[in-house]
Every structure is written in C-alpha cells, then in structure tokens.
C-alpha cells in the first residue's frame, strides 16, 4: 500500500503523523521538495515565514524512518533521516511530499474476510513483489533442466513463500519475461513459430517468424536484474511487504465476479486485458507493467498451452495490479456481490468446490 503525505522539514527532522505507518525502519521516497532559501543566508529557517523565492523541485530520493514517536491523540509520528536534496540545503525550509510503501495489515485482513464471504471455499490470491522482503521466504530451488516457473507457484497457493532469482528460472521465456535476460535467446523467432529444420523445433504459436519479430519490437524490459521476486499468499503478507500485484487462480464463476469487479468503477468497458504471451507473462510481466500506469487494468491469462500442465483443469488466472486491487477492496460491499444474483453464483461456486475437491 502506498500512503502519500506532506512533511514540513527543517534539517534532519520534523514530524507529521502518517496514517498507517506502524513500524520503524520503514523505507520512503521523496518525490518533490519546495526549496526556500532564507534571505541573507545563515543557518535555519523560520517556520511560518514567507520566503519569496521558493520553487518546487522534483526529486526521487530514498530514505528511512529511523524512529517513531507514539502520541496518544495523533498516533505515530516518524523521525525522518534523509540524504541532502542539495549540498547547500542548510538554512532552507522544505515542504516535502513523501511516499511510504508498506502493506496495510487492516487491508489484508479485510480482503481475507471478504474473500471467504463472497468466494467461499476458493483459494486466496497470491501476491508478488520485485525486490521484496525475503526473510521467511524459501529460496526457489534451481531447476534441473527446463521447468515452467508457473508450476512452482502451486506451493505458494498452499501457503509457502518463495523468493525467485536468476538461478531459479529454468525456462528461457520465463527468464526473459521476469526480467533476468535482457534479450531473447537465439532463434526465438523460429521457436515461437515455424521452427528451423535441423536447428530448433517450433511451438507454432505464431504463423511466421516475421510476426514474432513484430510482436517483440515493442517489448519492455523489466528491471529485476540482481533482485529477488517474492511470491506470497495474500494472508501471508507482512507489514514490510509492498506487493506489485495479486494473482487469482480461479474457475469461471469466481472469474465472472473478478471480471465484473475490475470494471465496476469505470465507464471504459476494457478494465481487463488479455494480451498474448507465455503463462508467466500474464502472471508477472503484464501485471507489473500495468502497475506502473496511473489507471492500471487487470490481466486475464493462463491461455499458454505450454503452461497449462502446471494448473488444474478449468483454472485461469486474473491478476490485479495493487493500485487497482486496493480500489476493488474498497467497493466490494457496494457492488453486485451483495445482490441475490451473486447468491445464485455462490451456490455454483459451492458445487464447483465439491466437484474439484480431491
């Protein structure tokens, strides 16, 4: 969860309550600062005084909350330590916009209750974070030979937390979509299409190598090099986590609810996209890209025939960028989920659970 606030800061510390901040050593990012030189120079700046030469300066500096002051009436006030915005900041007054990244435990628990209420007996979603907290997460083992990384996510659905890194991914397509390989492997254009006699067998997912070239032309590289990608089940998220997206593995009745929720608060009928790509692209690549947008879309996926052996029959995926999922949680109780129509669907969910229980 991202919480934005404004803190007036002189020197190393001035505190203002930040709602939801619950622990020290919380990372934050300075996104802008109003720089106000004090007339005549000197040290310090007078609070409340008007400085005529103020100007807004964008910045993108990481810092750390080094301590917390607990106030009975106002809650938690962070003691802020940050690097200098400029070498000459002494004697300046800053009005600083901060972004605090952490998981809201109340939000986590609220959705867990709503999930059981409206999607009873079905699996909770899993969440991923690039560069996430690896404490308590099992390092995903290096595969022996080719292995689709989607197969390993079954452990996460059962409650394990897995940290993937470059050595954990045995599929060359997976290494590309997860950002660990900057380029496609040689002859990929033939691999995805017709094949190349005597060199490589083709998957025949595209008609010609030229179509593959066109497909790849606009591909964006995700900056994961040197970072772990941590997957956790929703109810295993901790305060230190800041997930990029959540991913549901679901059957049609649940998907119908998720699809409708994804479109609930907008006139645009395209609140869900379903781009072509490998199974891992619909779970990680496209959801991560959507999370970077101001108005992200959910991603329907798991249509890749090569990844289908890793998921149960009749199961697809629906991934929500975290920005969008936070909004969804906020309006679930005013949506169609509270109607008699959804009660009928929940009876079908119950029957589906019975049919698919081992």
Image (tube, rainbow, N blue to C red):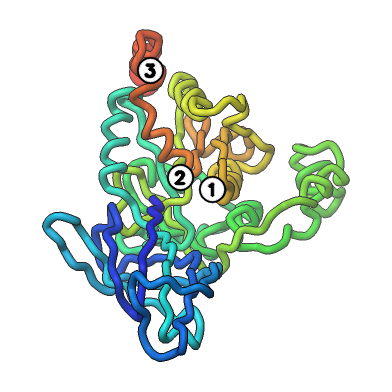
In front of the other: label 3 or label 1? 1
Q: Which mark is residue 266?
A: none
Q: Is residue 314 visible?
A: no
Answer left or right for 71 relative to 117.
Answer: left
Q: Are marks 2 and 3 in contact (CB under 8 Å)?
A: no
Q: Which mark is residue 291?
A: 1
> Which residue is labeled 2 in the image?
322
Point out residue 354 in the picture as x, y percentages from the top left corner: 33, 18
Q: CA distance from mark 2 to mark 3?
A: 25 Å
Point out residue 165 in the picture as x, y percentages from the top left corner: 50, 63
Answer left or right for 285 relative to 257.
Answer: right
Instruction: Check disc 3: other Cα within 10 Å, few if <14, some if 14-19, many if 20+.
Output: many
Compared to 118, does 152 lie above or below? below
Q: Earlier in the sequence, mark 2 or mark 3?
A: 2
Where is the C terminus found, in terms of image quarters? top left
> Which residue is labeled 3 in the image?
349
Q: Earlier in the sequence, mark 1 or mark 2?
A: 1
């Amino acid at each position: 969860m991202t919480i934005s606030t404004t803190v007036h800061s002189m020197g190393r510390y001035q505190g203002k309550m930040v709602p939801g901040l619950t622990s020290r050593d919380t990372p934050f990012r300075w996104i802008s600062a109003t720089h106000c030189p004090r007339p005549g120079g000197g040290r310090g700046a007078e609070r409340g005084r008007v400085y005529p030469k103020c100007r807004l300066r964008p910045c993108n500096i990481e810092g750390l909350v080094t301590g917390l002051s607990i106030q009975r009436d106002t809650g938690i006030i962070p003691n802020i330590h940050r690097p200098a915005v400029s070498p000459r900041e002494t004697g300046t007054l800053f009005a600083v916009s901060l972004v605090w990244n952490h998981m809201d435990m109340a939000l986590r628990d609220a959705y867990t209750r709503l999930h059981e209420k409206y999607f009873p007996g079905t699996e909770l979603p899993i969440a991923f974070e690039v560069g996430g907290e690896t404490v308590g997460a099992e390092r995903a083992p290096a595969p022996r030979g080719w292995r689709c990384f989607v197969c390993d996510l079954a452990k996460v659905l059962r409650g394990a937390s897995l940290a993937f890194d470059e050595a954990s991914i045995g599929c060359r397509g997976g290494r590309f979509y997860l950002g660990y390989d900057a380029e496609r492997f040689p002859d990929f254009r033939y691999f995805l299409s017709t094949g190349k006699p005597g060199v490589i067998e083709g998957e025949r997912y595209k008609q010609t190598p030229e179509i593959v070239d066109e497909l790849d032309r606009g591909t964006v590289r995700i900056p994961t090099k040197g970072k772990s990608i941590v997957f956790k089940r929703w109810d295993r998220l901790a305060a230190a986590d800041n997930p990029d997206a959540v991913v549901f593995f679901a059957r049609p009745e649940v998907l119908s609810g998720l699809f409708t929720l994804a479109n609930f608060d907008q006139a645009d009928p395209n609140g869900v996209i379903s781009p072509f790509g490998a199974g891992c692209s619909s779970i990680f690549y496209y959801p991560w890209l959507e999370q970077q947008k101001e108005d992200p879309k959910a991603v329907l996926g798991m249509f890749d025939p090569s990844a289908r052996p890793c998921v149960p029959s009749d199961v697809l995926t629906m991934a929500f960028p975290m920005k969008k999922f936070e909004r969804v949680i906020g309006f679930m109780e005013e949506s169609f989920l509270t109607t008699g129509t959804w009660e009928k669907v929940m009876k079908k969910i119950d029957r589906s659970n019975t049919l698919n229980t081992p």
